[in-house]
Image: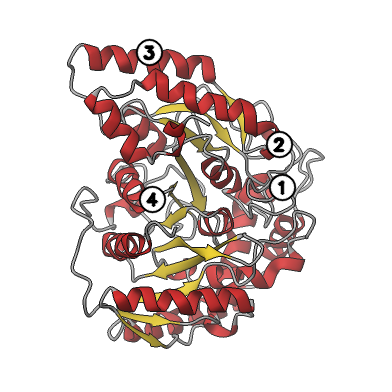
Amino acid sequence: MNELVRCTATELIAKMRTGEVSAVEIFNAHVEVIEAENSRVNALVTLCLERAHKEAILADQKFAKGESLEPLHGLPYAVKDTLPTKDLRTTFGSLLFEDYIPSADAIHVERARRAGAIVIGKSNTPEFASGAQTDNAVFGITRNPRDLSKTVAGSSGGSAAALAAYMVPMVDGSDLGGSLRSPASVCGVVGFRPTAGQVPKRDNTLPFDALHVFGPMARSVEDIALFMSVFTGRDTACPLSSTAESIDFNAPLEAALQGTRIAFSATPCGSKTHDEVKALLKTRCSTFESMGCIVDEACPDIADNHGVHAVAVALNAITELGGYLDDDRFAGSDRLRKFLQKGARLTAHEIAGARSIQARCWQVLSEFFSRYEFLLWPTMAGLPYSIDLTDAEVDEDWRPVELTPSLNLPAISLPAGLSREGLPVGLQLIGPPNSDFRLLRLAYGYQQAMLPGL
């Protein structure tokens, strides 16, 4: 394997800027891995390599002319198949859109292209990004590069697998209830869920929805910050972006972390966490303490918010997808059909009750964050599970990532280590809204303290 593919995105860009390597060399190195690995992993599903190769040549010509280079100059980039890409097939993992070719990019994809990134294809996803396995009727299932019998979770599983297999240095994804963080956890990479509005989106159906956010996945915290520096910024198409605080993701990640107060829970809100996950997380508490952080065992009382999340997802599903339920081409995972049916049955009393619980949980969190700056939880309560298991069989594993999205809390999943079987385990850092960059600084400090152990 060409060692170039093991470089982070930040390292590759530095090499291109000094002329050490060319964009075409980087492109070719990753294509070699795609050709060798993708048939067994099934991470990338629609490729545009010929077009991408031409763009890599143009990137090198720009460098040769001494022109100013963009932040993501010449960087290969895979886009989740639920995120629109202009003139490139976007199926949403559904037979309904098997041949759909959008006329416009998602806002952050458009920004990434302008910043010099080269789209090489789309990454696999469950149908309409719903499911605990990355599997669909159009492309089939994505397997974990670490162990082909294990899951990549969902719904940004193709993105995580492509990163873990070194097929591409830059990917994106979306997160409604863990879809960036859970795949990152089981594949041993970094997944970041930003505060809603930080990465704007075009959404004519649910323009004020803060549950479903777009964000980056990477192999280092520096790469996450780099991608966020390009993805973020207000856009008139996204009303939530006008309320998100302006954050400078280009600022230095190094920061004094002494005295940072972290609330740790290995079993947040009663999560049935696997003993190996508990043990790894407790060991990582010592890492944060070695950085000067103050780590207390404490957890906000927001267990009821798990039910709020279920109601919110059901409402989203019926609003966006209810019209497809009777279409024969709509395969629908068990979870997706369950959410659609639940959304259709929800009463005003149930919705009002969920909002009341959400308000109480927010009050609890507001008080909690006056004492602690961040939460430290497992990303997944269990170890990477079999690709044969259904959503219902692994539902409990997802509790730690599903407790916070409806409260609009940014969160990042970081590698915590390996299980006895050599499978990745992730830890989750969570902060209050718009603490995104402070969260990345804490994550970076942890990453530096762990190197070369990660």
Q: Earlier in the sequence, mark 2 or mark 1?
A: 2
Residue that badge 4 annotates: 220
Secondary structure beneath label 1: loop
Q: Are marks 2 and 4 in contact (CB under 8 Å)?
A: no
The foreground one among 430 and 345 is: 430
Tally of numbered tags: 4
Instruction: Identify residue for label 1.
Output: 148
Counting from the top left corner in percent of width and height, residue 283 is at 46, 77
Horizontal and vertical percent for residue 414? Answer: 45, 61
> Earlier along the polypeptide chain: callout 2 or callout 4?
2
| Most foreground residue, 83 or 257 | 257
Q: Which residue is mark 2?
A: 40
State the residue in front, 85 or 352: 85
Residue located 24% across and 58% down the image: 245
Instruction: Locate residue 66, reporting x and y percent.
Output: 17, 16
Mark 2 neighbour class, 10 Å CA radius: few under 14, some 14 to 19, many 20 or more: few
Q: CA distance from mark 2 to mark 3?
A: 29 Å
Three-letter residue code for mark 3: Ile
Give the residue number, with chain letter if any, for mark 3.
57
Q: Is residue 321 left or right of residue 293?
A: right
Vertical relation: 164 (above or below) 273: above
Q: Observer-nearest residue: 315 or 334?
A: 334
Q: Marks 3/4: CA distance? A: 27 Å
Q: Are marks 1 and 3 in contact (CB under 8 Å)?
A: no
Q: Earlier in the sequence, mark 1 or mark 4?
A: 1
